[in-house]
Image: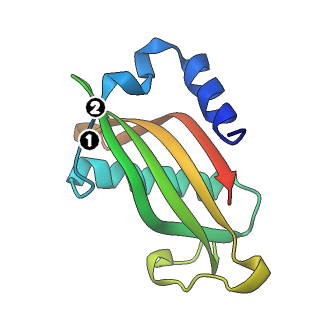
Amino acid sequence: MFWKLPLLLGLLALGPHVCSWMFEDIGKTGQEFSMCVEFAIHHFNEHQPDENAYKLLWVRRSQHKKFSLTYLMDLHLGRTICKKHDEDIDNCPLQEGPEGKKVNCTFIVDSRPLYTKFTLLNSTCQQI
């Protein structure tokens, strides 16, 4: 129950213009959504203090804000044995044992695919 509190506070801080009731479910394989997922994971890896990279395990929720290019996604990430600046992190094995951390993250990303521009509007992550 308490793990939901940071997410709720984050959405309230952003105001009603990005609250989830304005989003609608979309497929998880669309090109623009996939680019936003890639951007969110890259941003997560760049801004977390761990030197190991995290990779996508699965997409828990994929939504699109009506009449815009803003995406809301819940991602399940796992810690790999690779460093965050290594190549081909998607094929890097996950860490095992106590070092094998996993996180659930919610990202809200605004995209401008014509200009290849992405903006992270909000992110909230919880280690599981």
Q: In this view, does 77 lie above or below 10?
A: below
Q: Is residue 18 above or below residue 46?
A: above
Expressed as whole percent of the image width and height from the top left, the position of residue 66 reads 24, 24
Q: Badge 2: few (under 14), some or many (20 or more) residues near its Cα, within 10 Å?
A: some
Image quarter (top left, top right, bottom left or bottom right) of the C terminus: bottom right
Q: Circles 2 and 1: CB distance less than 8 Å? A: yes
Q: In terms of image quadrants, where is residue 85?
A: bottom right
Image quarter (top left, top right, bottom left or bottom right) of the N terminus: top right
Residue annotated with mark 2: 69
Task: Identify which residue is drawn at 66% across, 83% down.
Answer: 95
Expressed as whole percent of the image width and height from the top left, the position of residue 8 reads 60, 28
Q: In this view, does 26 lie above or below 119?
A: below
Amino acid residing under circle 2: Leu
Horizontal side, residue 7 vs residue 106: left or right: right
Which dot marks residue 113? 1
Task: Identify which residue is drawn at 34% across, 37% down.
Answer: 111
Q: Badge 1: few (under 14), some or many (20 or more) residues near its Cα, within 10 Å?
A: few
Task: Identify which residue is drawn at 56% across, 49% down.
Answer: 105
Amino acid residing under circle 1: Pro
Query: Residue 62 or 70: which is nearer the viewer?
Result: 62
